Image: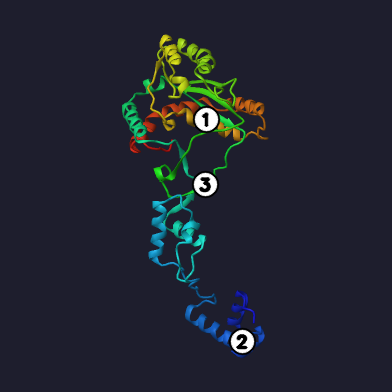
Amino acid sequence: MPRLTSAERERAIGRLEAGDTPEDVAATFQCHISTIYRLLQRFVITGSTADAKRSGRPRVTTSRQDRHIFRSHVAHPFRTAAETAITVIGTHQAPISRQTASRRLRFRGLRNCRPARGPVLTVRHRQACLHWAQGHLNWNNVRRQNVLFSGEIRFCIDHADRRVRVWRRSGYRYVDNCVVENNACGEHSLMLWGAIGHNQVLGSVIYQGLGAGPGNGVTAQRYMDQVLHSHELPFFQAHGNWVFQHDNARPKTSRATQDLLHRSGIQVMPWPALSPDMNPIEQFWDLLQTQLNRVVPRPTTVADLDRAVRQARTNIPRQASNSLVRSMHRRCQAVIDANGGHTRY
C-alpha cells in the first residue's frame, strides 16, 4: 500500500478527533488499520504526524579507522582518497568507498585543494632567503620606494592543465609538503621583461629573436641590448638615487652585464636565488595574466598573444603596482616566519 502523505495524515487525525472509528478512517484512505493505530499513537505521544527521525545507514568505519584515515593524509597530503579507501576494510567486511574516505577527511577539517607551486628550495636557498629578509625587514619606506624591481615572465598559448590536488587543512597552503615544486617551461610563447617601483612602471619589453634551439634564449647580449641600453640606463640617468633589483639568471650575472652596470654607476641590490615570492613583480605578472585571461577570443598565435599582452598591460592601474611595492615589509616578515621557506606571496 502507498504511504500516506502529510496532508492525508492530518485529515486522518481530524476524522479520528471528529469521532470516526479507526476502521472507517482506514477504509476511507484505503490503508491498513494498523497504519491508523500507529498514526494515532504517534500523534498522542509527540503531538505531530511527521515521521520520527531515522538513524540512517550504519557507519562502515570505526572511530579508530577514522583517525587512521585522517593521520595518513596529514602525513601524506598528496595521497588520494581512493588510495586510502582500498586499504581500509569497513565493518561490512569490504573496502570502503572513495566518497566515504572523503567524508571522513572533510569532517576532520581537510579539504581537497589545488596545491601551491614553488621552486625547489634546498637548505642553502632557505638560509639565503632568511638572511636577506632579516637584513631588509626594517628598511624604511624611503629606501624601499627607491628600489626598481624587475623580472621576466613567459606567456604561453598552450599550458599544462595541472589538475593535481592536495588534502590540507585551512591555513596550510604554503606548508612545504603541500606545495608542488616545479621548474617552469613552455612552448609557443613570449618572454616579457618589466620593472616596477613606487610610481614607476618600466616596459614591458618583449624579447626579440628568441627561438627553441641552443643559444636562442635570453642571453647576456640580448639582455644588455634590449633591456639595459633601451630602458634601464635611461631610467637611472634620470633617477640616480634608485637601486636596481634583478634575479641571478646567467644573463644578469655575466661579467659583461656586471661590467656595464658598474660602469654606468647603477647600484644593484643583492638578491637570493630562487626567491620569486619576495619580488613584487611576480604579483604584477599575476595582474597581467588576469587581464590576459579576460581576452575573448583567446589568442591562438604568437602575434595575437603579443597584441593581447600589450593591451592588457595598459589596463593595470598605477595604484596596483604601488601597493605591491609597499608590501615588501610583509614579504620579509612572511619569509622569516616560514624560516626561509615558501610563503603566500
Q: Earlier in the sequence, mark 2 or mark 1?
A: 2
Q: Quadrant of the N terminus?
A: bottom right
- Mark with earlier residue (3, 2): 2
| Residue 65 placement: quadrant | bottom left
Mark 2: few/some/many CA within 10 Å (<14, 14-19, 20+): some
Residue at the (60%, 74%) spot, across then down:
6
Give the side of residue 153 with respect to residue 119, left or right. Answer: right
Q: Quadrant of the C terminus?
A: top left
Q: Nearer the viewer, mark 3 or mark 1?
A: 3
Residue type highlighted by circle 1: Trp
Classed neighbour count for the residue bearing mark 1: other residues with Cα under 10 Å, few (<14), some (14–19), many (≥20): some
Residue behind mark 1: 285
Q: Whole-Å distance between the Cαs marked 3 and 2?
A: 57 Å
3 and 1 marks in contact (CB < 8 Å):
no
Three-letter code, disc 2: His
Where does the image place residue 288, in percent across and percent down from the top left?
Answer: 55, 30
Residue occupied by mark 2: 32
> Which mark is first along the chain, 1 or 3?
3
**Amino acid type of the residue tagged 3 in the rendering:** Val
In the picture, the disc for residue 164 is 3
Q: CA distance from mark 3 to mark 1?
A: 23 Å
Would residue 260 be visible to someone looking at this image? yes
Q: Residue at x 62, y 31 (%)?
A: 188
How far is mark 2 from mark 1, CA to CA?
73 Å
Q: Quadrant of residue 131?
A: top left
